[in-house]
Image: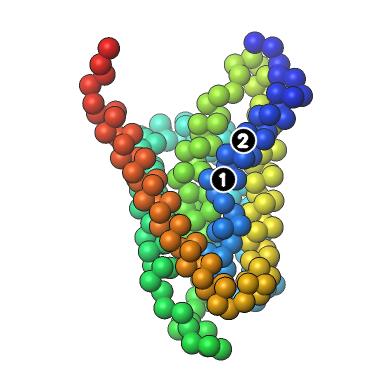
Amino acid sequence: MGSPDLTGLLREFLFGFGTLFAIINPYGLSFVFLDRTKSLSDTERRVLARHVAIAAFGVLVVSLFAGAVILRFFGISLPALRIGGGLVVAVSGWQMLHEKPPPEGQVSVAPPSSEALKRMIIFPLTIPLTTGPGTIATAIALSANQPTAIQGALLSSLVSLIVAIAIAITILNAYTYSGSMARLFGREGTYTVTRISAFLLLCVGVQIMLTGTLEAVRSLLPVTR
């Protein structure tokens, strides 16, 4: 199989970037990120956003290049990954959806400290909030379609790396300016968008679990010819 041309590489990049962008939805999640970091200043939030973006890049790279191998090593199937991760996402959305808004001019009771939030960079801010089981499963599926020829595989791997970088930059931009977007929407607008994002997050978690459950059931059914 020959090496792909520039048009094919561009098509591969757009497909990978578009697919992962739709799964992650960084600008929708930016309000969820803002809700989880509302005790921080804009400067502290920018620093945290940079750490989350770097961690998300790491998750994407590992998923794209070694995700399937890691899952096989631990004996974890993709349905199990989706069910477990989807449950965590759904619980997070449920908690946000039922969180009472603070009174006007008052911060929520006992907001997490900056040190506590730093410990939350990997879990849950990066996994499963930003790059959750759906993202990991999608990245693994994308990597499975790489060509077998050495030159083609190298070029596809380079495209995958560029896709991961582009997604990380998008996450960084969305999370960094989450406070600015909140000020643009205003207090009531931000509260409304946050609740909508929480509901969508709950639905995404349920959908991930349903997908994993259906895949698990299909794997148990006898194959008919």
SS at badge 1: helix
Residue beneath the point at 55% across and 77% down:
188
SS at badge 2: helix
Label drawn at residue 22: 1
Residue named by callout 2: 16
Is residue 49 shown to the viewer in this render?
no
- Image spot of residue 191 (x, y percent): 52, 73
Determine the image quadrant of residue 64.
Answer: top right
Residue density around tag 2, few if under 14, some if 14–19, many if 20 or more, within 10 Å? many
Mark 2 to mark 1 CA distance (whole Å): 10 Å
Tally of numbered tags: 2
Residue density around tag 1, few if under 14, some if 14–19, many if 20 or more, within 10 Å? few
- Image spot of residue 38 (x, y percent): 56, 75
Q: Quadrant of the C terminus?
A: top left
Colour basis: rainbow
Q: Tell which circle, 2 or 1, labels the residue nearer the N-terminal end.
A: 2
Vertical placement of residue 182 versus 165, above or below: below
Vertical placement of residue 107 versus 211, above or below: below
